[in-house]
Image: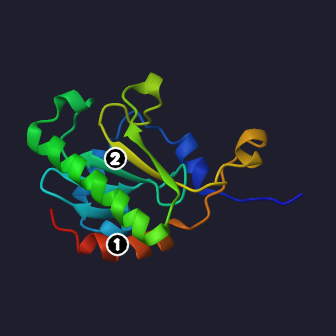
Amino acid sequence: MKKIWAPWRMEYITKDKSGECIFCSLPQSKDDKKTFILFRGKYCFVIMNIFPYNASHLMVSPYRHLACITKLDSEESLEMSELTKNCIEILRDVNSPDGFNVGFNIGKSAGAGYDEHIHNHIVPRWIGDTNFMATLAETRVISEHLEKTYEKLAPRFKKLLL
């Protein structure tokens, strides 16, 4: 039997998520590479999910601490939408996925890990990316290291103009 090691998952599983809001604290850092922030807009930013569902799983979040998309003002909403479209275009060009899952998890019951700060998920999908591992072993295999993904995507986001 083969073993697949994903030690970074334990940090997420055991981390106390009740105190810190990563969508508020991480943009405070000036080290985008360390925080996996790919783009900073006027109202929103693009960040890699460091506990991804799939390789190149991105999130778009407003800087303001809001729990629901209904609380976004029109500028935030427009920028979030434009960044989501740009993320899809960049991921299509760089990784050639077969499709995407895009959406919000609003509230804990909907699966939000950080339910008090809204963020939009952009998850590239490939035919065959879900296999027996997720079903039988409750294990997801991520095909590329986070740092490698960041190195591939960052140059494209540096050129992005809104």
Identify whether 153 is placed above or below 56. below
Q: Nearer the viewer, mark 2 or mark 1?
A: 1
Gap in angstroms between the C-alphas marked 2 and 1: 20 Å
- Measuring from the top left, give residue 115's x and y in whole percent: 36, 31
Identify the residue under disc 1: 154
Of residues 49 and 74, the one nearer the viewer is 74
Of labels 2 and 1, earlier in sequence is: 2
Q: Label 1, secondary structure: give it.
A: helix
- Look at the image and tell me in which quarter the C terminus lies: bottom left
Identify the residue under disc 2: 22
- Measuring from the top left, give residue 12's x and y in whole percent: 53, 46
Q: Is residue 3 left or right of residue 134?
A: right
Q: Label 2, secondary structure: give it.
A: helix
Q: Which three-letter amino acid code belongs to the residue tagged 2?
A: Ile
- Measuring from the top left, give residue 24's x and y in whole percent: 26, 46
Q: Which three-letter amino acid code belongs to the residue tagged 1?
A: Ala
